[in-house]
Amino acid sequence: MNNNLHTNLSAWLIALITILLITSCKTEPKSDTSQRLDKAPSSIQLRLKSEPDGLSPIVARHGVSRQVYRHLFVRLLEVDPMTLNYIPQLATKQATSEILDNGDKKFTFDIHPNAQWSDGRPLTVADILFSYKILKHPGVKTRYGVIADLIKEIDIQENNSTTISFTADECHISLESSICEMFIYPEHIFDPEKIMRDVAYVDFKEKEKIASLVSENPKLAEVGERFMDVSYFRDPNKFITAGAYTFKEWLTGQRVVIQKNKNWWGNAIDSPIFINRPEEIQFQIIPDNTTAMTQLANGELDAISDVTAELFEEYKSKENLSAHVVPALQTIWLTLNTKKGLLSDKLVRKALAYSCDEQSIIDIARKGYGKIVTGPFMPGTAEYNDKVKPIGYDIQKAITLLKEAGWADSDQDGIVDKMVNGKKTNLSLEFVMSSKSTTGPVIGELFKNSAKKAGIDIRIQAKDRKVYGQDQKAGNFDMVLQGTSFNPGLYDPKGRWHTESFPPNGLNHCRFGDEETDKIIDQLRSECEDAGLRTDLYHRLHAKIAEEQPVLFLYNTQYLYLINKKFDNVVLSPNRPGLYEEFLTLK
Protein backbone atom coordinates (compact mmCIF):
# COMPACT_ATOMS: atom_id res chain seq x y z
CA MET A 1 0.00 0.00 0.00
CA ASN A 2 0.97 3.62 -0.41
CA ASN A 3 2.44 4.53 2.98
CA ASN A 4 0.94 8.00 2.73
CA LEU A 5 -2.49 6.42 2.96
CA HIS A 6 -1.96 5.29 6.54
CA THR A 7 -2.66 7.30 9.65
CA ASN A 8 0.35 8.28 11.74
CA LEU A 9 -0.47 6.39 14.89
CA SER A 10 1.25 8.70 17.39
CA ALA A 11 1.18 8.27 21.15
CA TRP A 12 -2.29 6.73 21.42
CA LEU A 13 -1.55 3.76 19.21
CA ILE A 14 1.99 3.33 20.53
CA ALA A 15 0.54 3.08 24.03
CA LEU A 16 -2.15 0.76 22.74
CA ILE A 17 0.35 -1.61 21.14
CA THR A 18 2.27 -1.65 24.41
CA ILE A 19 -0.93 -2.66 26.20
CA LEU A 20 -1.52 -5.41 23.67
CA LEU A 21 1.97 -6.77 24.02
CA ILE A 22 1.58 -6.87 27.78
CA THR A 23 -1.89 -8.38 27.49
CA SER A 24 -0.60 -11.14 25.23
CA CYS A 25 0.68 -13.00 28.22
CA LYS A 26 3.96 -14.04 26.66
CA THR A 27 5.68 -13.49 23.35
CA GLU A 28 5.09 -15.87 20.50
CA PRO A 29 7.81 -18.50 20.09
CA LYS A 30 8.81 -18.52 16.44
CA SER A 31 10.23 -21.99 16.09
CA ASP A 32 8.79 -24.27 18.78
CA THR A 33 5.74 -25.28 16.77
CA SER A 34 5.34 -28.63 18.50
CA GLN A 35 5.16 -26.94 21.89
CA ARG A 36 2.42 -24.64 20.69
CA LEU A 37 0.44 -27.52 19.20
CA ASP A 38 0.74 -29.49 22.45
CA LYS A 39 -0.83 -26.58 24.29
CA ALA A 40 -3.56 -25.87 21.75
CA PRO A 41 -7.06 -26.07 23.29
CA SER A 42 -9.18 -28.92 21.99
CA SER A 43 -12.26 -26.71 22.28
CA ILE A 44 -13.02 -23.23 23.54
CA GLN A 45 -16.40 -21.86 24.59
CA LEU A 46 -17.24 -18.26 23.69
CA ARG A 47 -20.40 -16.22 23.97
CA LEU A 48 -22.55 -14.59 21.32
CA LYS A 49 -24.89 -11.90 22.66
CA SER A 50 -27.57 -12.74 20.13
CA GLU A 51 -28.47 -15.02 17.26
CA PRO A 52 -26.35 -14.28 14.16
CA ASP A 53 -28.36 -12.89 11.27
CA GLY A 54 -26.38 -15.08 8.90
CA LEU A 55 -22.82 -16.16 8.15
CA SER A 56 -22.47 -14.66 4.67
CA PRO A 57 -20.11 -11.68 5.16
CA ILE A 58 -21.73 -9.31 2.66
CA VAL A 59 -25.29 -10.14 3.72
CA ALA A 60 -25.05 -10.43 7.52
CA ARG A 61 -25.15 -7.11 9.37
CA HIS A 62 -24.73 -7.99 13.03
CA GLY A 63 -21.38 -7.90 14.81
CA VAL A 64 -22.00 -11.33 16.33
CA SER A 65 -22.05 -12.78 12.82
CA ARG A 66 -18.61 -11.35 12.13
CA GLN A 67 -17.24 -13.06 15.25
CA VAL A 68 -17.91 -16.35 13.48
CA TYR A 69 -17.53 -15.80 9.74
CA ARG A 70 -14.11 -14.14 10.01
CA HIS A 71 -12.73 -17.64 10.72
CA LEU A 72 -14.42 -19.10 7.64
CA PHE A 73 -13.64 -16.67 4.83
CA VAL A 74 -10.49 -14.93 3.58
CA ARG A 75 -9.65 -11.58 2.02
CA LEU A 76 -6.75 -10.30 -0.05
CA LEU A 77 -5.35 -8.46 2.96
CA GLU A 78 -6.29 -8.82 6.61
CA VAL A 79 -5.72 -6.62 9.66
CA ASP A 80 -2.88 -7.60 11.97
CA PRO A 81 -4.50 -7.38 15.43
CA MET A 82 -1.24 -6.26 17.03
CA THR A 83 -0.20 -3.44 14.68
CA LEU A 84 -3.58 -2.64 13.02
CA ASN A 85 -1.79 -2.67 9.66
CA TYR A 86 -3.19 -4.51 6.65
CA ILE A 87 -0.98 -7.49 5.84
CA PRO A 88 -1.26 -10.16 3.11
CA GLN A 89 -3.68 -13.03 3.61
CA LEU A 90 -4.90 -14.44 0.31
CA ALA A 91 -2.44 -12.11 -1.46
CA THR A 92 1.22 -13.11 -1.33
CA LYS A 93 2.34 -9.51 -0.79
CA GLN A 94 1.09 -5.93 -0.79
CA ALA A 95 -0.29 -4.65 -4.08
CA THR A 96 1.94 -3.11 -6.70
CA SER A 97 0.48 0.14 -7.96
CA GLU A 98 0.96 2.23 -11.06
CA ILE A 99 -0.50 5.32 -12.70
CA LEU A 100 -1.73 4.59 -16.21
CA ASP A 101 -1.34 6.96 -19.16
CA ASN A 102 -4.97 8.08 -18.82
CA GLY A 103 -4.45 8.93 -15.16
CA ASP A 104 -6.20 5.84 -13.78
CA LYS A 105 -4.60 4.07 -10.84
CA LYS A 106 -4.02 0.33 -11.04
CA PHE A 107 -3.46 -2.09 -8.15
CA THR A 108 -2.20 -5.58 -8.91
CA PHE A 109 -2.25 -8.52 -6.49
CA ASP A 110 -0.77 -11.99 -6.73
CA ILE A 111 -2.50 -14.64 -4.65
CA HIS A 112 -1.17 -17.83 -3.08
CA PRO A 113 -1.03 -20.48 -5.83
CA ASN A 114 -1.86 -23.25 -3.33
CA ALA A 115 -4.97 -21.54 -1.93
CA GLN A 116 -7.98 -23.79 -2.01
CA TRP A 117 -11.53 -24.21 -0.79
CA SER A 118 -12.51 -26.64 1.94
CA ASP A 119 -13.82 -29.07 -0.70
CA GLY A 120 -10.35 -29.25 -2.24
CA ARG A 121 -11.09 -27.06 -5.28
CA PRO A 122 -8.45 -24.39 -6.05
CA LEU A 123 -9.20 -20.78 -5.09
CA THR A 124 -8.31 -18.60 -8.06
CA VAL A 125 -8.69 -15.00 -9.18
CA ALA A 126 -11.89 -16.10 -10.94
CA ASP A 127 -13.42 -16.49 -7.46
CA ILE A 128 -12.29 -12.98 -6.58
CA LEU A 129 -13.79 -11.47 -9.72
CA PHE A 130 -17.03 -13.37 -9.09
CA SER A 131 -17.13 -12.00 -5.53
CA TYR A 132 -16.91 -8.40 -6.72
CA LYS A 133 -19.52 -8.94 -9.43
CA ILE A 134 -21.96 -10.48 -6.95
CA LEU A 135 -21.94 -7.20 -5.02
CA LYS A 136 -23.91 -5.65 -7.87
CA HIS A 137 -26.20 -8.57 -8.71
CA PRO A 138 -29.79 -7.25 -8.45
CA GLY A 139 -30.86 -10.35 -6.53
CA VAL A 140 -28.27 -9.89 -3.78
CA LYS A 141 -29.19 -7.69 -0.83
CA THR A 142 -26.01 -6.16 0.55
CA ARG A 143 -24.71 -2.85 1.86
CA TYR A 144 -21.21 -3.55 0.49
CA GLY A 145 -21.99 -2.42 -3.05
CA VAL A 146 -20.06 0.78 -2.35
CA ILE A 147 -16.86 -1.28 -2.61
CA ALA A 148 -17.63 -2.02 -6.26
CA ASP A 149 -18.52 1.63 -6.87
CA LEU A 150 -14.91 2.61 -6.22
CA ILE A 151 -13.52 0.17 -8.79
CA LYS A 152 -13.65 1.04 -12.48
CA GLU A 153 -12.44 -2.28 -13.85
CA ILE A 154 -11.10 -5.66 -12.70
CA ASP A 155 -8.75 -7.59 -14.96
CA ILE A 156 -7.71 -11.24 -14.91
CA GLN A 157 -5.96 -13.28 -17.59
CA GLU A 158 -7.38 -16.57 -18.84
CA ASN A 159 -4.01 -18.34 -18.53
CA ASN A 160 -3.10 -16.82 -15.14
CA SER A 161 -5.08 -17.99 -12.11
CA THR A 162 -3.11 -16.02 -9.51
CA THR A 163 -2.88 -12.39 -10.73
CA ILE A 164 -5.67 -9.82 -10.54
CA SER A 165 -5.71 -6.07 -11.14
CA PHE A 166 -8.12 -3.38 -9.93
CA THR A 167 -8.36 -0.04 -11.71
CA ALA A 168 -9.88 3.20 -10.41
CA ASP A 169 -10.36 6.39 -12.40
CA GLU A 170 -9.70 8.63 -9.43
CA CYS A 171 -7.68 8.55 -6.27
CA HIS A 172 -9.56 7.72 -3.09
CA ILE A 173 -8.04 7.51 0.38
CA SER A 174 -9.77 4.26 1.26
CA LEU A 175 -9.63 2.62 -2.17
CA GLU A 176 -7.09 -0.07 -1.42
CA SER A 177 -8.43 -0.86 2.06
CA SER A 178 -11.95 -1.03 0.57
CA ILE A 179 -10.75 -3.49 -2.06
CA CYS A 180 -9.33 -5.64 0.72
CA GLU A 181 -12.50 -5.42 2.83
CA MET A 182 -14.21 -7.90 0.48
CA PHE A 183 -14.45 -11.53 1.60
CA ILE A 184 -14.08 -14.05 -1.21
CA TYR A 185 -16.81 -16.52 -2.23
CA PRO A 186 -16.53 -19.79 -4.20
CA GLU A 187 -17.65 -19.28 -7.78
CA HIS A 188 -18.08 -23.03 -8.38
CA ILE A 189 -20.72 -23.24 -5.63
CA PHE A 190 -22.87 -20.24 -6.51
CA ASP A 191 -22.27 -20.10 -10.27
CA PRO A 192 -21.44 -23.69 -11.26
CA GLU A 193 -22.21 -23.00 -14.93
CA LYS A 194 -20.01 -19.85 -14.90
CA ILE A 195 -22.87 -17.76 -16.26
CA MET A 196 -21.54 -14.54 -14.74
CA ARG A 197 -18.26 -14.87 -16.64
CA ASP A 198 -20.15 -13.85 -19.77
CA VAL A 199 -21.09 -10.49 -18.23
CA ALA A 200 -18.35 -7.87 -17.92
CA TYR A 201 -17.65 -6.28 -14.57
CA VAL A 202 -18.51 -2.82 -15.96
CA ASP A 203 -21.96 -4.12 -16.96
CA PHE A 204 -22.64 -5.18 -13.37
CA LYS A 205 -21.98 -1.59 -12.31
CA GLU A 206 -24.71 -0.23 -14.61
CA LYS A 207 -27.84 -0.75 -12.55
CA GLU A 208 -30.40 -0.69 -15.35
CA LYS A 209 -28.30 -2.80 -17.68
CA ILE A 210 -27.58 -5.59 -15.21
CA ALA A 211 -31.22 -5.59 -14.08
CA SER A 212 -32.27 -6.09 -17.70
CA LEU A 213 -29.71 -8.86 -18.25
CA VAL A 214 -30.85 -10.71 -15.12
CA SER A 215 -34.53 -10.42 -16.05
CA GLU A 216 -33.80 -11.80 -19.52
CA ASN A 217 -31.56 -14.66 -18.38
CA PRO A 218 -33.07 -17.08 -15.82
CA LYS A 219 -29.67 -18.73 -15.30
CA LEU A 220 -28.17 -15.40 -14.29
CA ALA A 221 -31.09 -14.79 -11.93
CA GLU A 222 -30.54 -18.21 -10.38
CA VAL A 223 -27.02 -17.21 -9.30
CA GLY A 224 -28.45 -14.44 -7.12
CA GLU A 225 -31.14 -16.72 -5.75
CA ARG A 226 -28.58 -19.38 -4.90
CA PHE A 227 -26.35 -16.81 -3.24
CA MET A 228 -29.22 -15.60 -1.04
CA ASP A 229 -30.25 -19.18 -0.13
CA VAL A 230 -29.42 -19.44 3.59
CA SER A 231 -28.84 -23.19 3.33
CA TYR A 232 -25.47 -22.50 1.71
CA PHE A 233 -24.42 -20.85 4.97
CA ARG A 234 -26.11 -23.24 7.43
CA ASP A 235 -25.88 -26.71 5.91
CA PRO A 236 -22.47 -28.30 6.62
CA ASN A 237 -22.74 -30.22 3.34
CA LYS A 238 -23.14 -26.99 1.35
CA PHE A 239 -21.06 -24.50 3.35
CA ILE A 240 -17.69 -24.26 1.54
CA THR A 241 -15.01 -22.07 3.13
CA ALA A 242 -11.42 -21.00 2.50
CA GLY A 243 -10.49 -19.94 6.03
CA ALA A 244 -8.73 -21.72 8.86
CA TYR A 245 -12.00 -23.25 10.06
CA THR A 246 -14.92 -25.08 8.51
CA PHE A 247 -18.55 -24.92 9.54
CA LYS A 248 -19.82 -27.76 11.75
CA GLU A 249 -23.29 -26.85 13.05
CA TRP A 250 -25.72 -24.10 13.96
CA LEU A 251 -28.44 -24.89 16.47
CA THR A 252 -30.81 -21.93 16.58
CA GLY A 253 -30.91 -20.32 20.00
CA GLN A 254 -28.12 -22.55 21.28
CA ARG A 255 -24.76 -22.45 19.52
CA VAL A 256 -22.71 -22.14 16.35
CA VAL A 257 -19.73 -24.50 16.08
CA ILE A 258 -16.73 -24.32 13.75
CA GLN A 259 -13.80 -26.75 13.55
CA LYS A 260 -10.20 -26.43 12.43
CA ASN A 261 -9.51 -27.27 8.82
CA LYS A 262 -6.52 -29.60 9.24
CA ASN A 263 -5.81 -29.41 5.51
CA TRP A 264 -5.99 -25.62 5.36
CA TRP A 265 -3.67 -24.15 2.76
CA GLY A 266 -2.59 -21.44 5.22
CA ASN A 267 -1.19 -23.81 7.83
CA ALA A 268 2.32 -23.61 6.41
CA ILE A 269 2.44 -19.79 6.29
CA ASP A 270 4.30 -17.97 9.08
CA SER A 271 2.16 -14.91 9.82
CA PRO A 272 0.08 -13.75 12.81
CA ILE A 273 -3.13 -13.86 10.78
CA PHE A 274 -2.56 -17.53 9.90
CA ILE A 275 -2.51 -18.75 13.51
CA ASN A 276 -5.36 -21.15 14.35
CA ARG A 277 -4.77 -23.14 17.52
CA PRO A 278 -8.10 -24.31 18.99
CA GLU A 279 -9.35 -27.49 17.37
CA GLU A 280 -12.93 -26.34 17.76
CA ILE A 281 -14.65 -23.08 18.67
CA GLN A 282 -18.16 -23.20 20.11
CA PHE A 283 -20.05 -19.91 20.10
CA GLN A 284 -22.78 -20.22 22.73
CA ILE A 285 -25.81 -17.95 22.12
CA ILE A 286 -26.54 -16.35 25.51
CA PRO A 287 -28.46 -13.05 25.34
CA ASP A 288 -28.66 -12.53 29.12
CA ASN A 289 -25.55 -10.90 30.58
CA THR A 290 -25.96 -12.31 34.09
CA THR A 291 -26.40 -15.85 32.78
CA ALA A 292 -23.29 -15.48 30.65
CA MET A 293 -21.23 -14.19 33.59
CA THR A 294 -22.39 -17.04 35.80
CA GLN A 295 -21.32 -19.56 33.18
CA LEU A 296 -17.96 -17.81 32.83
CA ALA A 297 -17.35 -17.91 36.57
CA ASN A 298 -18.33 -21.60 36.64
CA GLY A 299 -15.96 -22.47 33.80
CA GLU A 300 -18.72 -23.26 31.29
CA LEU A 301 -17.53 -20.33 29.15
CA ASP A 302 -13.87 -19.51 28.56
CA ALA A 303 -14.09 -15.79 27.78
CA ILE A 304 -16.55 -12.94 27.40
CA SER A 305 -15.93 -9.90 25.23
CA ASP A 306 -17.38 -6.42 25.71
CA VAL A 307 -18.50 -7.03 29.29
CA THR A 308 -20.77 -4.38 30.81
CA ALA A 309 -18.94 -2.06 33.20
CA GLU A 310 -21.09 -3.11 36.16
CA LEU A 311 -20.45 -6.82 35.67
CA PHE A 312 -16.79 -6.20 34.92
CA GLU A 313 -16.38 -4.50 38.30
CA GLU A 314 -18.24 -7.33 40.00
CA TYR A 315 -16.30 -10.21 38.42
CA LYS A 316 -12.84 -8.79 37.63
CA SER A 317 -11.38 -10.03 40.94
CA LYS A 318 -12.63 -13.60 40.58
CA GLU A 319 -9.80 -16.02 41.28
CA ASN A 320 -10.15 -17.93 38.00
CA LEU A 321 -10.56 -14.88 35.73
CA SER A 322 -8.17 -12.34 34.25
CA ALA A 323 -9.49 -8.84 33.52
CA HIS A 324 -8.42 -6.73 30.55
CA VAL A 325 -9.18 -3.16 29.40
CA VAL A 326 -8.45 -2.18 25.78
CA PRO A 327 -9.21 1.09 23.92
CA ALA A 328 -11.76 0.44 21.19
CA LEU A 329 -12.20 1.84 17.71
CA GLN A 330 -15.64 3.07 18.72
CA THR A 331 -17.25 6.34 19.78
CA ILE A 332 -20.63 6.81 21.49
CA TRP A 333 -22.64 9.93 20.75
CA LEU A 334 -26.09 11.50 20.68
CA THR A 335 -27.30 12.20 17.16
CA LEU A 336 -29.27 15.47 17.07
CA ASN A 337 -31.84 16.46 14.47
CA THR A 338 -30.46 19.68 12.99
CA LYS A 339 -33.12 20.15 10.32
CA LYS A 340 -36.42 19.56 12.08
CA GLY A 341 -37.84 20.34 15.49
CA LEU A 342 -36.48 22.37 18.39
CA LEU A 343 -32.87 21.27 17.83
CA SER A 344 -32.74 22.90 14.41
CA ASP A 345 -31.57 25.99 16.34
CA LYS A 346 -27.79 25.81 16.86
CA LEU A 347 -28.05 27.86 20.05
CA VAL A 348 -30.33 25.20 21.55
CA ARG A 349 -27.92 22.45 20.47
CA LYS A 350 -25.06 24.33 22.11
CA ALA A 351 -27.08 24.82 25.29
CA LEU A 352 -27.85 21.11 25.29
CA ALA A 353 -24.13 20.37 24.99
CA TYR A 354 -23.29 22.61 27.95
CA SER A 355 -25.94 20.83 30.01
CA CYS A 356 -24.43 17.38 29.34
CA ASP A 357 -21.94 16.16 31.94
CA GLU A 358 -19.88 13.71 29.87
CA GLN A 359 -17.40 12.92 32.64
CA SER A 360 -20.17 11.91 35.03
CA ILE A 361 -21.61 9.70 32.29
CA ILE A 362 -18.23 7.99 31.89
CA ASP A 363 -17.71 7.67 35.65
CA ILE A 364 -21.18 6.32 36.43
CA ALA A 365 -22.49 4.60 33.28
CA ARG A 366 -19.09 3.21 32.31
CA LYS A 367 -17.42 3.06 35.76
CA GLY A 368 -14.67 5.30 34.38
CA TYR A 369 -13.95 3.11 31.33
CA GLY A 370 -14.06 5.72 28.59
CA LYS A 371 -12.47 8.93 27.31
CA ILE A 372 -14.06 12.27 26.41
CA VAL A 373 -13.85 13.11 22.70
CA THR A 374 -14.75 16.18 20.67
CA GLY A 375 -15.10 14.78 17.16
CA PRO A 376 -15.77 11.74 15.00
CA PHE A 377 -12.14 10.63 14.71
CA MET A 378 -10.06 8.41 16.96
CA PRO A 379 -8.11 10.28 19.67
CA GLY A 380 -4.35 10.10 19.17
CA THR A 381 -4.53 9.68 15.40
CA ALA A 382 -3.48 12.30 12.86
CA GLU A 383 -7.12 12.89 11.92
CA TYR A 384 -8.12 13.97 15.42
CA ASN A 385 -7.88 17.74 16.06
CA ASP A 386 -6.47 18.21 19.56
CA LYS A 387 -7.05 21.96 19.30
CA VAL A 388 -10.79 21.37 19.57
CA LYS A 389 -11.35 21.24 23.31
CA PRO A 390 -14.30 19.67 25.13
CA ILE A 391 -17.17 22.13 25.48
CA GLY A 392 -17.46 21.28 29.18
CA TYR A 393 -20.34 21.01 31.58
CA ASP A 394 -21.57 24.53 32.36
CA ILE A 395 -25.24 25.01 33.31
CA GLN A 396 -24.94 28.79 33.49
CA LYS A 397 -23.69 28.96 29.89
CA ALA A 398 -26.56 26.70 28.86
CA ILE A 399 -29.08 29.03 30.51
CA THR A 400 -27.48 32.08 28.87
CA LEU A 401 -27.64 30.50 25.40
CA LEU A 402 -31.27 29.51 25.87
CA LYS A 403 -32.16 33.07 26.85
CA GLU A 404 -30.36 34.31 23.74
CA ALA A 405 -32.48 31.91 21.69
CA GLY A 406 -35.67 33.28 23.27
CA TRP A 407 -36.36 30.54 25.84
CA ALA A 408 -37.51 31.42 29.37
CA ASP A 409 -39.52 29.73 32.12
CA SER A 410 -42.60 31.95 31.78
CA ASP A 411 -44.88 29.80 33.96
CA GLN A 412 -42.24 28.86 36.59
CA ASP A 413 -42.73 25.11 36.08
CA GLY A 414 -39.01 24.41 35.80
CA ILE A 415 -39.06 24.00 32.01
CA VAL A 416 -38.19 26.85 29.67
CA ASP A 417 -40.69 27.72 26.98
CA LYS A 418 -41.34 30.14 24.14
CA MET A 419 -43.87 30.84 21.40
CA VAL A 420 -43.30 28.59 18.38
CA ASN A 421 -45.61 29.10 15.40
CA GLY A 422 -48.03 31.01 17.63
CA LYS A 423 -48.14 28.29 20.32
CA LYS A 424 -46.49 28.21 23.72
CA THR A 425 -43.98 25.34 23.56
CA ASN A 426 -41.91 23.76 26.29
CA LEU A 427 -38.30 22.80 25.52
CA SER A 428 -39.04 19.10 25.83
CA LEU A 429 -36.90 16.64 23.88
CA GLU A 430 -37.18 12.90 23.32
CA PHE A 431 -34.05 10.87 24.12
CA VAL A 432 -34.23 7.60 22.14
CA MET A 433 -32.09 4.57 22.88
CA SER A 434 -32.06 0.92 21.90
CA SER A 435 -34.40 -1.24 23.94
CA LYS A 436 -31.49 -3.67 24.30
CA SER A 437 -28.99 -1.12 25.60
CA THR A 438 -27.59 -1.71 29.09
CA THR A 439 -25.87 1.68 29.49
CA GLY A 440 -28.58 3.69 27.69
CA PRO A 441 -30.97 3.95 30.66
CA VAL A 442 -28.17 5.16 32.93
CA ILE A 443 -26.93 7.70 30.38
CA GLY A 444 -30.49 8.87 29.80
CA GLU A 445 -31.20 9.46 33.50
CA LEU A 446 -27.91 11.27 34.06
CA PHE A 447 -28.53 13.52 31.07
CA LYS A 448 -32.13 14.12 32.08
CA ASN A 449 -31.08 15.24 35.55
CA SER A 450 -28.30 17.55 34.37
CA ALA A 451 -30.36 19.10 31.55
CA LYS A 452 -33.22 19.79 33.95
CA LYS A 453 -30.96 22.25 35.77
CA ALA A 454 -30.94 24.36 32.60
CA GLY A 455 -34.71 24.06 32.19
CA ILE A 456 -34.59 21.39 29.48
CA ASP A 457 -37.00 18.47 29.76
CA ILE A 458 -35.66 15.12 28.54
CA ARG A 459 -38.11 12.29 27.87
CA ILE A 460 -36.40 8.91 27.76
CA GLN A 461 -37.78 6.41 25.27
CA ALA A 462 -36.48 2.88 24.58
CA LYS A 463 -37.24 1.62 21.06
CA ASP A 464 -36.40 -1.29 18.85
CA ARG A 465 -33.44 -0.51 16.60
CA LYS A 466 -35.48 -1.00 13.44
CA VAL A 467 -38.13 1.41 14.69
CA TYR A 468 -35.84 4.27 15.61
CA GLY A 469 -33.77 3.59 12.48
CA GLN A 470 -36.87 4.25 10.38
CA ASP A 471 -37.60 7.38 12.42
CA GLN A 472 -34.08 8.66 11.79
CA LYS A 473 -34.38 8.07 8.06
CA ALA A 474 -37.67 9.99 8.04
CA GLY A 475 -36.25 12.77 10.23
CA ASN A 476 -38.79 12.14 13.00
CA PHE A 477 -36.63 12.34 16.11
CA ASP A 478 -34.96 14.76 18.50
CA MET A 479 -31.91 12.82 19.66
CA VAL A 480 -30.76 9.20 19.45
CA LEU A 481 -28.08 7.48 21.51
CA GLN A 482 -25.83 5.49 19.22
CA GLY A 483 -22.25 4.83 18.31
CA THR A 484 -19.99 4.10 15.41
CA SER A 485 -17.09 1.72 14.96
CA PHE A 486 -14.03 2.47 12.87
CA ASN A 487 -11.87 0.30 10.69
CA PRO A 488 -8.09 0.62 10.83
CA GLY A 489 -6.65 3.06 8.32
CA LEU A 490 -7.91 6.40 7.11
CA TYR A 491 -11.48 7.33 7.92
CA ASP A 492 -13.77 8.25 5.03
CA PRO A 493 -16.24 10.81 6.40
CA LYS A 494 -18.57 10.94 3.41
CA GLY A 495 -21.03 8.29 4.60
CA ARG A 496 -21.86 10.14 7.82
CA TRP A 497 -21.01 13.80 7.26
CA HIS A 498 -21.63 14.71 3.59
CA THR A 499 -24.95 16.19 2.49
CA GLU A 500 -25.16 13.55 -0.25
CA SER A 501 -25.41 11.04 2.62
CA PHE A 502 -28.65 12.39 4.04
CA PRO A 503 -31.04 9.43 4.46
CA PRO A 504 -31.90 7.31 2.60
CA ASN A 505 -28.60 7.68 0.73
CA GLY A 506 -26.35 7.38 3.76
CA LEU A 507 -25.95 7.59 7.52
CA ASN A 508 -25.90 11.37 7.96
CA HIS A 509 -28.92 11.16 10.26
CA CYS A 510 -28.17 14.49 11.93
CA ARG A 511 -28.36 16.16 8.48
CA PHE A 512 -25.07 17.97 9.05
CA GLY A 513 -23.26 19.83 6.32
CA ASP A 514 -23.22 22.60 3.77
CA GLU A 515 -21.31 23.52 0.63
CA GLU A 516 -18.16 24.31 2.63
CA THR A 517 -18.03 21.03 4.56
CA ASP A 518 -18.92 19.02 1.45
CA LYS A 519 -15.97 20.62 -0.34
CA ILE A 520 -13.66 19.73 2.56
CA ILE A 521 -14.84 16.12 2.50
CA ASP A 522 -14.55 15.81 -1.28
CA GLN A 523 -11.02 17.21 -1.26
CA LEU A 524 -10.04 15.08 1.71
CA ARG A 525 -11.24 11.85 0.08
CA SER A 526 -9.16 12.45 -3.03
CA GLU A 527 -5.95 13.59 -1.31
CA CYS A 528 -3.80 10.47 -1.58
CA GLU A 529 -0.31 11.96 -1.70
CA ASP A 530 -0.02 14.98 0.60
CA ALA A 531 -0.51 13.61 4.13
CA GLY A 532 -0.04 17.06 5.67
CA LEU A 533 -2.79 18.63 3.57
CA ARG A 534 -5.06 15.67 4.26
CA THR A 535 -4.52 16.04 8.01
CA ASP A 536 -5.34 19.74 7.78
CA LEU A 537 -8.60 18.91 6.01
CA TYR A 538 -9.51 16.38 8.70
CA HIS A 539 -8.84 19.03 11.35
CA ARG A 540 -10.96 21.62 9.56
CA LEU A 541 -13.85 19.17 9.31
CA HIS A 542 -13.47 18.25 12.98
CA ALA A 543 -13.62 21.94 13.93
CA LYS A 544 -16.71 22.58 11.78
CA ILE A 545 -18.55 19.63 13.30
CA ALA A 546 -17.71 20.89 16.78
CA GLU A 547 -18.89 24.39 15.86
CA GLU A 548 -22.25 23.26 14.47
CA GLN A 549 -22.89 20.67 17.24
CA PRO A 550 -24.90 18.18 15.13
CA VAL A 551 -24.12 15.50 17.70
CA LEU A 552 -23.10 15.35 21.34
CA PHE A 553 -19.93 13.28 21.53
CA LEU A 554 -20.03 11.37 24.81
CA TYR A 555 -16.98 9.11 24.95
CA ASN A 556 -14.51 6.88 23.20
CA THR A 557 -15.24 3.35 24.36
CA GLN A 558 -12.91 1.03 26.23
CA TYR A 559 -13.68 -2.66 25.75
CA LEU A 560 -13.75 -4.85 28.84
CA TYR A 561 -12.82 -8.54 28.74
CA LEU A 562 -12.89 -11.37 31.24
CA ILE A 563 -10.95 -14.52 30.34
CA ASN A 564 -10.29 -17.77 32.16
CA LYS A 565 -6.80 -17.80 33.65
CA LYS A 566 -6.08 -21.23 32.21
CA PHE A 567 -5.16 -19.53 28.94
CA ASP A 568 -1.89 -18.05 27.76
CA ASN A 569 -1.20 -15.90 24.70
CA VAL A 570 -4.28 -13.72 25.17
CA VAL A 571 -4.32 -11.30 22.24
CA LEU A 572 -6.73 -8.38 22.46
CA SER A 573 -7.09 -5.62 19.90
CA PRO A 574 -9.14 -2.45 19.39
CA ASN A 575 -10.05 -3.92 16.02
CA ARG A 576 -13.14 -6.09 15.77
CA PRO A 577 -13.79 -8.63 17.23
CA GLY A 578 -11.38 -7.60 20.01
CA LEU A 579 -10.48 -11.02 21.39
CA TYR A 580 -8.49 -13.07 18.89
CA GLU A 581 -9.24 -16.52 20.26
CA GLU A 582 -7.19 -18.26 17.59
CA PHE A 583 -4.01 -17.28 19.49
CA LEU A 584 -5.02 -18.92 22.77
CA THR A 585 -2.94 -21.70 24.30
CA LEU A 586 -3.31 -23.56 27.57
CA LYS A 587 -0.86 -22.77 30.36
Image (tube, rainbow, N blue to C red):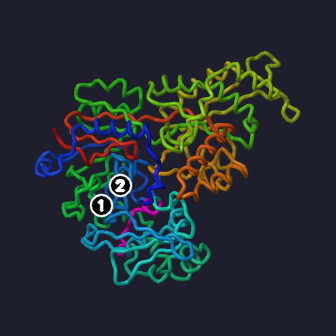
Image position of 292 with respect to 232: above or below: above
The structure residue drawn at horizontal position 56% and vertical position 72%, both measured from the top left corner, is: 103
In percent of width and height, residue 569 lies at: 23, 41
Q: Which residue is mark 1?
A: 243
Provide the residue designation for mark 2. 70
Quadrant of the image for the N terminus? bottom left
- Judging depth in this view, the residue of 302 and 226 nearest the camera is 302
Compared to residue 256, the image places residue 157 above or below, namely below
Q: Is residue 364 above or below residue 559?
A: above
Mark-to-mark CA distance, 2 and 1: 8 Å
| Residue at x-position 40% and y-position 48% | 64
State the residue at coordinates (62%, 75%).
Answer: 208
The residue segment tinted magenta is 178-189
Mark found first going from the N terminus, 2 or 1 = 2
Residue 452: percent from left, percent from top:
67, 21
Mark 1: which amino acid?
Gly
Q: Is residue 289 left or right of residue 400?
A: left
Identified by mark 2, the residue type is: Arg
Viewer-proximal residue, 87 or 127? 87
Quadrant, the C terminus: top left
